[in-house]
Image (spheres, rainbow, N blue to C red):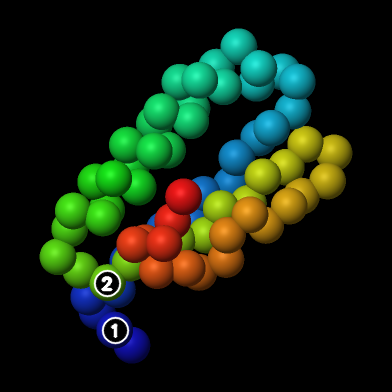
Amino acid sequence: MNKNLTDLTLIVDKSGSMYSVKGKAEAGINGLIADQKGEDTDCTFTLVEFSDKHNTVQNAVPISRAR
């Protein structure tokens, strides 16, 4: 086990009911990614979106490659 590894996994609701906060949610996620990129630890990033179905956008990629 790597005690210096952060596994950042986000599950994001993309349904129509979230439309009014979409911009704020995206800005928050982008800020979180930027903060993690600035940390001196290993970090993997997973992003899963869902509405009526789920979609894994990124799966355990190094935070440096997160988009």
Q: Is residue 29 left or right of residue 51?
A: left
Q: Position of residue 44 (x, y in %)?
A: 40, 67
**Structural distance between the alpha carbons of marks 1 and 2:** 9 Å
Which numbered tag is attached to residue 16? none
* Front of the two marks 1 and 2: 2
Q: Residues within 10 Å of mark 1 (few under 14, many from 20)?
A: few
Place residue 6 in its image quadrant.
Answer: bottom left
Q: Is residue 45 above or below residue 24?
A: below
Q: Which residue position holds label 2?
A: 42
Residue type at mark 1: give it: Asn
x and y percentages locating residue 9 in the rendered image? 49, 56
The answer to whether 32 appears left or right of 20 in the picture is left
Give SS at disc 1.
loop
Q: Position of residue 56 (x, y in %)?
A: 67, 57
Residue type beneath disc 2: Asp
Residue beneath label 1, please?
Answer: 2
Q: Is residue 7 visible?
A: no
Q: Are marks 1 and 2 in contact (CB under 8 Å)?
A: yes
Q: Earlier in the sequence, mark 1 or mark 2?
A: 1
| Residue lying at 39% horizontally and 31% vertically, measured from the top left | 28
